Amino acid sequence: MRLSASRFVGLTLVGLGALSLNVCGGGGSSPGGPTPPTPPPVATPTPPPTIDPPLSGSCAKLPAGSATASCKTDTPDFQTQVDEAIRTLHREQPQMFDGDQVLSAGGFYVGLIRVLDRQGLCAATEGEELGVANSASYNEQYDVLSAKGGVRFGPGSYRVTCSPSPSSIPLPSPGLPPQQQGCPLAPSREIACGREPEGKYYLEVEAAITQILKDKPELFDFSETAPGTDFVRIVDLLGYNKGMVDIMTTKGFLREARRRGAGAREGHERQQRAPRPGHLSRQLLPGRVLRKRPASAAFTPA
C-alpha cells in the first residue's frame, strides 16, 4: 500500500490501565438505630506519566552541539570503540541481525548509543550517521549502516572529525511535545527510524483504511486511481489523516498528526492516493542520495 513519502503515520501503542474504584456498600443496621449514610466512592488519582531518563547519560553531561561545527577528515580516536560496540550489540541482541544485515535500523542506532554510553562515550544520530564524542571539544562521525541495511564495519565507517569547540553533538533537543489528553504515556521523541521487515501494526492500519473508505467516502474520488494501482485519489488529506487518527485512537493507539514542510499545501494534497487494503506491503520509502563511500571491512561479530 502506498502512502505519501512526506506523510508518516507514526503509531504509538497506548497501554490502557484499568482504574478500579472501591465503592463502599451499605452496612448492616444497628438494632433500633438509624441507618448510617453510604459514603461516596473515592476515585484513585491517576499518577502522572513517568518521563524516561535520557537515552545517553554521557550526552546529558555535555553542552548541546553546534550545527556550524567545522568538519574534516583526520585520524579517528573512537574507531575501536565503535567497532566493538557493534560486536557487543550483535551478541546482546542477535535477533536484530541477519548475518551482516540489520533488521531494525532504529533499534540498531539506539542500541549502539546505549552500548557506547556504557563506555562513557556520547553518541547521537540524525538518522544518517553516528556521532561519537567524549567531550565538547570535538566529535567523530561514523557511517555504520549502508543504504541497503548492511553493517559498515572497520576504517570504512569513519567519515570526519568535527572541531573545534563546540562539537556537532549532542544534537540540540527541540524539546518534547505537549502531553496528549487521554494518553497515559509521557511525551517522547523518536531517536532513529527505519523500515522493519514487518510492521507490528500492519493489520490494524489496514483495517482502519478499510473502515475509513467505507465510513467517509466523501474524502475520496473513487473514479480516479494512480496508474497501475487501485489507489483512489484523496480529495481531503487533512480529513483523511484526522479520520485515520480517530479510528486508530479508538483501537487503543495514539498518534500526533504532524504536517511536514511544503508538502502539506493543498495543491500537493490533491495528488495523494489512498492505498487499498491489501497493498500496505507495497509501501516504499524515499531513496537516499549517497556519496561514494570507501570499502568497509567485512563484519565479523565474534
Image (tube, grey):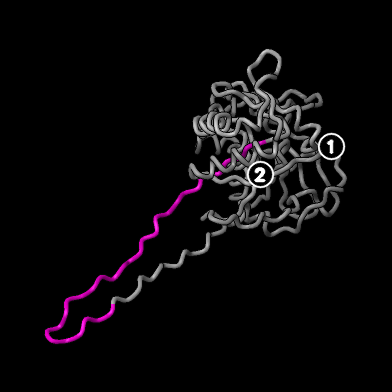
Position in image of residue 10 (x %, y %) = 61, 40
Q: Tell me: residue 119, above or below residue 240.
A: below
- Label 1 close to label 2 by CB (< 8 Å): no
Between 276 and 151, the one lying in front of the other is 276
Task: Tell me the CA gap for discs 1 and 2.
Answer: 40 Å
| Callout 2 secondary element | loop
Relative depth, front residue between 163 and 66: 66
Amino acid type at mark 2: Ala
**Front one among 16 and 265:** 265
- Residue at the location (62% across, 25% down)? 275
| Residue marked by disc 1 | 73
Whether residue 28 appears in magenta in the rendering, the answer is: yes
**Quadrant where the C terminus lies?**
top right
Name the kind of residue labelled 1 in the image. Answer: Thr
Question: Label 2: which residue?
Answer: 257
Q: Is residue 96 visible to the viewer in this orientation of the structure?
A: no
Neighbor class of circle 2 (other Cα within 10 Å; few <14, some 14-19, many 20+) is some
Residue beneath the point at 45% across and 67% down: 45
Quick one: 184 or 238, which is closer to the camera? 238
